[in-house]
Image (tube, rainbow, N blue to C red):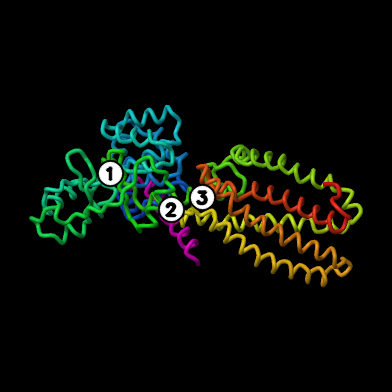
Amino acid sequence: MDLRENSLEKSKIIANELKTSLEEKNIFHLRDIIYDTNEVTLANIFEEYFEIKDILFMFKVIKKEKTAEIFAYLPQNMKQQVINGLQDHEIKVMLDYMFTDDISEFLEELPANIVKRVLNSASNQRRSEINMILNFKENSAGSVMSTDYVELDPEITADEALKMIKDKERLAETISYCYITNNQHILLGFVSMKSILLASANTLISDIMETDVISVECDEDQEEVAKIFTKYDLLVLPVVNDQHRLIGIITIDDVYDIIQDEVTEDLQKMGGITPIEGSYINMSIIEMVKSRITWLLILMISATVSGLILSKNSDLTLKIPSLVIFIPMLMDTAGNAGSQSSAMVVRGIAVDNLNIGDFKYVIKTEFLNSLILGAILFAVNILRILVFMPKISMSIAILISATIYIIVTIANLIGGILPLLASTLKQDPASMSGPILTTVCDAISLTIYFSLASLFLGGGLYGI
């Protein structure tokens, strides 16, 4: 039995035990099972095996801290059902035990009337914190941060700091690092829990804090946040406003979500799909159609260019029918070469911070690559035609191979340039790596192919 099957079997056993406890009204055993089970596992079990009325009952008889932990991992539709089934005072208590980034995340996708009810149920401080996060631009650092952190004065002692941390432990998302601010909340530095524990009781925090603190402004894009985490190998990152006042933190678990979202968005754009949130399983057919149809229509219309090129050269293909055989291969080769180049440059932009200043380097690199790749493909294609298509003349074989050499070179250059231009124009480079690039390369490959064919086989430019 593999790990997944073992996990499913374990979940089924826990679900059966919970159902038995519910049927027997054995609240004590029910609580023991829930307290001994990971909240992620419980959220999956609740989604798979229980109706909302049973979930609401279990939430009412367990500790509110555990309720908040499980609620954070429930799917969005189930969260909405839970909110609808809770009283206002129950919502308030649950919100007090939840981290603000988790609250803002699920509120963003709720109907306005339910959001209003949740905010009205929250305490004044909680409501203010949630509203601040919700008012930040979507996908900015401020929109994914948490306001649940430990803030310390530089003039207190290590012993006093420990007491403050103990008081705030339940409300803080992490206590691994505490942030040092002045009375205006200006970020001065940070101190690790390890440093506080190892310091003598009377040591001032100012004597053990680190002042070289990495921070991010609240309006920074979340993709840049992920890059900072990766570059500096961080577990937590403080968020400041334009006056360098500490307003929140971003933890590594949020960055995992950011990276997943960014990768999903890039893959969708590279596949010619309008970015859409939500999982494949939970997405409706209408949502899927809407996310795909726009680019399909654009690409269908843009493919008209390729059709016109073929139409204008129909006399040449009638004169030399064997030319038609190689059109799909040439178009595929051009598209694949461009996509490979584009994928490398998109990664370079994301990982190595490539920008328009590296234009000459990218052009040089892709040109040298294309010379080598083109030479290899030229030789292999000649051999392929001689072995598998002996009836094709050597002149046509050389024509096809020469076309491959040229289109690979051009496609590589285009694939390298387009993402750089997109990045410079503040557009997502990934959007230039999919069907758009392929369509451009198709048109160029056909133009080059028929131009060469007309020159060398048709006795001058023919039908172009």
Circle on res. 356: 3
Q: Mark 1 or mark 2: which comes first in sequence?
A: 2
Q: Mark 2 or mark 3: which comes first in sequence?
A: 2
Q: Is mark 2 on a helix, strand or loop?
A: helix
Provide residue 460's location: percent of width, then percent of height: 86, 53
- Residue designated by label 1: 148
Query: Of residues 298 and 198, which is closer to you in this image?
Result: 298
Type of residue at label 3? Ile
As measured in the structure, the alpha-carbon distance from the residue carrying label 1 to the one carrying label 2 is 36 Å
Provide residue 437's location: percent of width, then percent of height: 64, 49
Provide residue 93's location: percent of width, then percent of height: 28, 37
As measured in the structure, the alpha-carbon distance from the residue carrying label 2 to the one carrying label 3 is 60 Å
Provide residue 462's location: percent of width, then percent of height: 86, 50
Query: Of residues 398 and 20, which is closer to you in this image?
Result: 398
Q: Which residue is drawn at 84% across and 45% down?
A: 312
Q: Residue at x 18, y 42 (%)?
A: 182
Q: Which residue is drawn at 39% across and 35% down?
A: 83
Vertical relation: 215 (above or below) 52: below
Looking at the rendered image, the disc whose residue lies closer to the viewer, 1 or 2, is 1
Vertical relation: 142 (above or below) 416: above
Question: How would you rate the neighbour count of disc 2 (Cα within 10 Å): few for under 14, some for 14-19, many for 20 or more?
Answer: few
Residue range in magenta is: 1-26
Q: Is mark 1 on a helix, strand or loop?
A: loop
User: Are discs 2 and 3 less than 8 Å apart at CB?
Assistant: no
Let me know if residue 357 is in the magenta part. no
